Amino acid sequence: MSEDELNGVKPLLRAVEEVFHIDENDADDEVTEGLDFKSEVVENVRSLNLPLTADKIVRCQDKTKEWITACVQEQDDSPGSKDAVDIYTTAISSMAELTARTVELFHKFTELLLHQAEQAIETSSLVRAQCVRKMTDAVLEEISVIATHFAGCLNTAADDSDSPDSVSSLITTLYLDSSTSADYLRNSLKLLRPVLQLSSLDEKNASKI
């Protein structure tokens, strides 16, 4: 690639890089539940215009929501009936599964970009970068929401427990695990940047043919 060609593609490379910039203060934002998680994830994955679906991510979230709803109902009906350790272990496994399903989608996304270069050019790399970032932001928010709801169940368990301090320590650990899951997902997202920048170069080269 000549110097002129490189200068011509630099703005696009910078634009893609900017999409993946993560402000460290973002992790401290207050959790809100304003977005429709399922719609946000499904629409952004569909907009990638690749043979990918968000089905596993959505099913994971649905299963977690059902468990939390059942837990709250059981605690209301029979105070003290729900074991705090059971709540905690379910919370950890739920966040871990949601994180794993999202990273699995990242891997498939990367594979499709690298091995279906010609078909992949149908949608710009910048648009794909924006979509995968929005999808990831939705999952990150959902991890925080899940942690908050499970912490609520643990707070109820603490109120009904003979040793509330032991339950309180589980709540602290739960939030630390939530933060670990979020950090892992952010780091995985950053690894997509060079792949999408490479895709940007492919677009430029294809446009000359």
Image: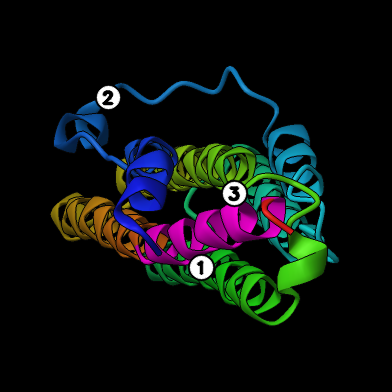
Estimate how packed mark 3 is, as few (under 14), some (14 to 19) or many (20 or more) residues with alpha carbons within 10 Å.
many
Mark 3 or mark 1: whose residue is earlier in sequence: 1
Taking the spot 20% from the left edge, 50% from the top edge, the residue there is 168
Determine whether label 3 and label 1 are within 8 Å by CB. Answer: no
Q: Which of 98 and 66 is in front in this view?
A: 98
Give the side of residue 15 with respect to residue 161, left or right.
Answer: right
Estimate how packed mark 1 is, as few (under 14), some (14 to 19) or many (20 or more) residues with alpha carbons within 10 Å.
some
Give the side of residue 69 with respect to residue 32, left or right.
Answer: right
**How far apart, in angstroms, are the residues tagged by discs 3 and 2?**
28 Å
Residue tagged 3? 125
Determine whether label 2 and label 1 are within 8 Å by CB. Answer: no
Quadrant of the image containing the N terminus: bottom left
Q: Which portion, as a residue range, is magenta? A: 191-207
Taking the spot 47% from the left edge, 62% from the top edge, the residue there is 95
**How far apart, in angstroms, are the residues tagged by discs 3 and 1?**
37 Å
Judged by depth in the image, the label closer to the viewer, 2 or 1, is 2
Whole-percent x, y for residue 74 in the image: 65, 48
Check disc 1 and give the amino acid type. Answer: Thr
User: Compared with residue 141, is residue 110 higher up or lower down, i.e. above or below?
Assistant: below
Q: Which of 135 and 165 is in front in this view?
A: 135
Say what secondary structure mark 3 lies in.
helix
Residue tagged 1? 90
Check disc 2 and give the amino acid type. Answer: Asp
Residue tagged 2? 29
Question: How many marks on residues?
Answer: 3
Say what secondary structure mark 1 lies in.
helix
